[in-house]
Image (tube, rainbow, N blue to C red):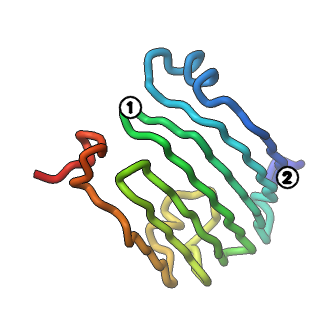
Amino acid sequence: MSEESATVHLAAKDLDISKLVAVLMPGVPLGGHLSLSADLDVGGKRETAHVTLDLRDGELFDLSPIAAQADVGFDARRAAGGIHVVLGSVGSVTATAVDASLAGPMLRAASYQNATGTLVVDAPSISPKSPNACPACSIP
């Protein structure tokens, strides 16, 4: 690690989100179990990262179960990966970027706002009128 770059390795296995939220944001109805692995090399001439995430038994207000899996990789200003999310009875959504180009460093928000490439989003079973959907998800 130097003043201009850093290498970071993060790992969590079966983290109980409800216990973390109880300490950081008491009263917020959020729960589930999270496993995460992230390897980042940032700030140098060639930034790289690989992040995997697995959420199971998730809860947010009255919406459950929520599950998500993600696998995303960055190499210099190229990005590829995907995420699949299941939102209880509301449905599921999958987003995949095969070969995206960031407009700058991967930790800068503007790099994503001006990114180029293709993002494919598939939401075949999203049903906002589902009787079990959360009120914020319903369409009149």
Q: Secondary structure at mark 2?
A: strand
Circle 1 packing at 10 Å, graded few (<14), some (14-19), many (20+), is: few
Residue at 78% across, 40% down? 12
Q: What is the residue that sits farthest to the left in this orientation? A: 140
Horizontally, is 102 left or right of 47 in the view? left
Q: Using the image, tell me which numbered label, if any, was put on residue 9.
A: none
Q: Is residue 137 above or below residue 107?
A: above
User: Residue 9 appears at what percent x and percent y?
Assistant: 84, 48
For badge 2, the amino acid type reads: Thr
Q: Is residue 92 above or below residue 27?
A: below
Circle 2 packing at 10 Å, graded few (<14), some (14-19), many (20+), is: some
**Structural distance between the alpha carbons of marks 2 and 1:** 36 Å
Q: Is residue 65 above or below residue 101?
A: above
Residue at 85% across, 52% down? 7
Q: What is the residue that sits farthest to the right in this orientation? A: 1
Residue at 71% across, 69% down? 73
Residue closest to the eye, 26 or 31: 31
Q: How many marks?
A: 2
Viewer-nearest of discs 2 and 1: 1
User: Residue 58 appears at what percent x and percent y?
Assistant: 54, 39
Circles 2 and 1: CB distance less than 8 Å? no
Horizontally, is 123 left or right of 49 in the view? left
Residue at 81% across, 43% down? 11
Q: Is residue 99 above or below residue 109?
A: below
Label whose residue precedes the other's in the sequence (2 or 1): 2
Q: Secondary structure at mark 1?
A: loop
User: Residue 94 appears at what percent x and percent y?
Assistant: 50, 68
For badge 1, the amino acid type reads: Phe
Q: Using the image, tell me which numbered label, if any, was put on residue 7.
A: 2
- Label 1: which residue? 61
User: Residue 24 appears at what percent x and percent y?
Assistant: 56, 20
